[in-house]
Image (tube, coloured by chain):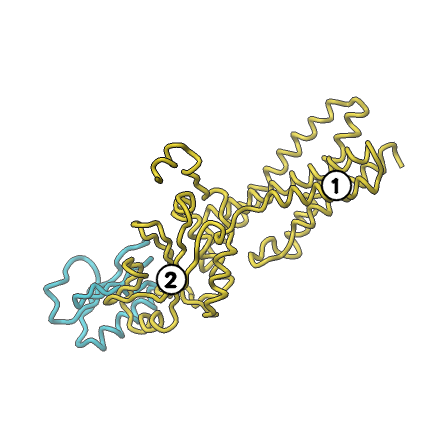
Chain colours: A cyan, B yellow
Amino acid sequence: MADNILAIITRKENHNKVAGGLPIFFAEDEQEMERISTLLARITLGMVHDLENGVKIIIKH
Amino acid sequence: MFEYGGLFLTSILVGIVARAFMLKIDYRQFPSFPHSYAIHLTLGMIAAALGALIVPALVAEEYIAVTFLTIGAQQFRDVRSMERDSLNRIEMTELVPRGEAYIEGIAKLFEARNYMALLTSLATSLIYYYSNTILAIIGGGIIGYILHWFMKGARVGDIAEIKIVELSFKGKNIGIDDVIMMNVGEDEAFKKWHHEGIGIKVIPKDENARATLAGLGQRQAILHDLSILMGIKLDKGLQQFTPLARLNIENGTLNIIFIPQEPDKVFIEEAVKRIPVLESSQRKPLSDKMGRKAAD
C-alpha cells in the first residue's frame, strides 16, 4: 500500500474536480477540510498533501 | 607450559587487546553492551588464537595445520552475515532506517576486524619467535594500531563542504533554493517546518564526491546518523516530519531538510562532517582517464 492515495478531501463546490473509486470527503469550509484531513492522516498513519487547487489527498508513504 | 606456551599466550593476549581496542561504544550505539561485546570479544579471541597458531605449526613442520585458517575465514564470514541479519531485523523498528548500504558497511567492518586481530597476533608471534616478549608486545601493539589506522575511512567533511541554510517555502512546498523536496498539506505541520525546520547543503568538493553523495545509501546513512546525533522530531504516523535528502541535479549538491531536537547550527554542521563515507557508496570517476577528461 506504499505511496498510494488513500482518500481525497475537498470542498463541496469542487466536486467536479474529483471522481473515481477512492473515498472522497466533502467539507463545508476550509476549517473543516483542514480538520478532516488531519484526522484522516492520523487515523490512517498517512500524510496530507495539498494539490493547491482546493484538493487535498492522503498518501501512505 | 608446553613448548610454545609463551609465544602462544603473548600473541593471543595482544590479539584480544587489539580487538577490544577496536570495540568502542560511540554514537552509533553499535555494538551494544554487554551482549554484542561478549560475542565480538570471544570471536576476537578465536581469531587471535588462529593467528598465534601459525608460527608454532610452521616451526613444527605441520604445514597441513595451515588449513585451519580456512575454517577461520569461513567462521568470520559468518560474523558478517550475523551482523547483517541482526541489523536488518531491527531496521523495521528504526524511525530513520540505516539503509542497506550502511548495514553492509557495518557487517563488513566486523568481519574485517577479526582478520585484523588475527594478523596482529600473527605479527606478535613472529616477533616473539625472533626476539623476546617485550619486543613482541610492543611490536604487536604498533602493528595492531597501524592496521586499525589504515581502516579509517573518509568522512563527509573530507569530501564536501557543509552549509546550514534556511528552508524555502513555495505555496505548500518545502525545499532548499529551487529544489522542492516535500509537499505538506497540513497547516500545523507547515508551521512547524517554518519555525523549526533546518536545511543543510552538502556541497561536493569534486566529481568523486559528487558521485559518492548521489548514492542513496550514503544519503540514508547521513540521515540516520544525523537523527541520532541531533535528535529528531518524528514519530510513526507523522511522516510529514520525515527528514529528506534530495539532490540538486544541476550541480550535485545534496540538500537535507529535517527538524532537529537540538537546533544548534554549529553542532549540526560538525555532526554532518563527522559522518563516515560508506565504503560501498564510494565512487571514483576521477580515477579513470575518461572521468578526468569529462570533468574538465
Residue B140 numbered mark, or none: 1
Quadrant in the rendering for residue B35: bottom right
Left or right of B136 on screen, residue A31: left
On what subunit does the disc labeled 2 rest?
Answer: B
Q: Which of B173 and A23 is in front in this view?
A: B173
Where B295 falls versus B216 (above or below)?
above
How crowded pointer 1 is (Cα within 10 Å; few <14, some 14-19, many 20+) is rated as many
On what subunit does the disc labeled 1 rest?
Answer: B
Q: In terms of secondary structure, where does tag 2 sit?
A: strand
Q: Which of B1 and B171 is in front in this view?
A: B171
Give x and y (percent) for residue B274.
52, 56
Left or right of B259 on screen, residue A60: left
Where B126 falls versus A18 (above or below)?
above
Residue lying at 50% horizontally and 54% vertically, measured from the top left: B275
Give x and y (percent) for residue B267.
50, 65
Left or right of B111 on screen, residue B167: left
Assign the N terminus of chain B to one quadrant of the image. top right
Where B126 falls versus B206 (above or below)?
above
Which mark is in front, 1 or 2? 1
Q: How far apart are marks 1 and 2 (CA)?
A: 46 Å
Amino acid residing under circle 1 = Gly
Residue lying at 33% horizontally and 67% vertically, measured from the top left: A43
Left or right of B125 on screen, residue B168: left
Assign the C terminus of chain B to one quadrant of the image. top left
Q: Earlier in the sequence, mark 1 or mark 2?
A: 1
Give x and y (percent) for residue A14.
12, 68
How crowded pointer 2 is (Cα within 10 Å; few <14, some 14-19, many 20+) is rated as many
Amino acid residing under circle 2 = Ile
Q: Nearer the viewer, residue B123 or B269?
A: B269
Are marks 1 and 2 in one subunit? yes
Residue B257 numbered mark, or none: 2
Give x and y (percent) for residue B84.
53, 45
